[in-house]
Amino acid sequence: MTEKPKHGTEHYFTAAPKSREKLGLITATLRGKSLTFLTSSSVFSKKRIDAGTRLLIEAMILPDAGTVLDVGCGYGAVGIAAAASNPQLRIVMTDVNLRAVQLARRNLEINKVYNAEVRNGYLYDPVKDFKFNGVVTNPPVSAGMETVKNLIAQAPQVMAEQATFQMVIRSKIGAKTLPAVFKENFGNCQVLARKSGYRVLMAQKQ
């Protein structure tokens, strides 16, 4: 499912990273909460919360209650921030990268977040039987645009009626092409936020 890494290095969408684990620790204030994350090599943005992830976290519109899916969760920043901001929500996080999944589970414990869980698997495979009230994602662009387009196209299968799908993209990469993919699969698309060369796109299942 994943592309081979370029130049002999692993990208973060690798299912079972073979690089030596080099742990790090970062702290950030997200949606008004101070959160701490254990990170590692072969996991996306291991040294800081990157600008795109931060924009998605601060801009995402979450339901008052229900379930929300974070696809491609990495070490868990988006899903944990969502869960910490509203204990009434149930958050499910998925990632193909087993190292990322293990880190996300540890980060739930570190931040004492109990209304979330992490599942290992490709895109929506671990949650085929779920219907979510919202889906959020910082997509794995390193895996190629076809993977990103599949992530959008398959989302309605796990979404309840009126659920929202929110994705952060780098403006210079997907701003022209991805809104059309949103409209093809949802019939609608809006720009929820723009900042630092990123934008958050949102669609609603009609």
Image (cartoon, rainbow, N blue to C red):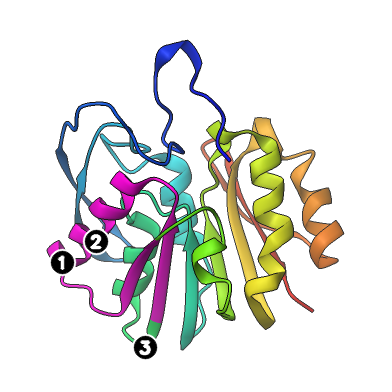
Position of the C terminus, as image quadrant, is bottom right
The answer to whether residue 15 shows anywhere in this view is yes
Q: Decide: marks 2, 1 in contact (CB < 8 A)?
A: yes
Q: Which residue is mark 3?
A: 88
Residue 29 located left or right of residue 9: left
What amino acid is found at the position of numbered circle 3 in the picture?
Gln
Q: Earlier in the sequence, mark 2 or mark 3?
A: 3
Q: Which of the 4 quarters of the picture holds residue 154?
A: bottom right
- 14 in magenta: no
Q: Position of residue 119 (x, y in %)?
A: 39, 64
SS for dot 3: loop
Residue beneath the point at 70% across and 50% down: 150
Q: Which residue is mark 2?
A: 105
Q: Which residue is mark 1?
A: 109
Q: Which of the 4 quarters of the picture holds residue 44?
A: top left
Residue beneath the point at 39% across and 81% down: 90
Q: Which of the 4 quarters of the picture holds residue 186?
A: bottom right
Residue beneath the point at 79% across and 38% down: 176
Q: Position of residue 126 (x, y in %)?
A: 49, 65
Provide the residue span drawn in magenta.
90-119
What amino acid is found at the position of numbered circle 1 in the picture?
Glu
The CA span between labels 3 and 1 is 18 Å
Q: Position of residue 125 (x, y in %)?
A: 55, 62
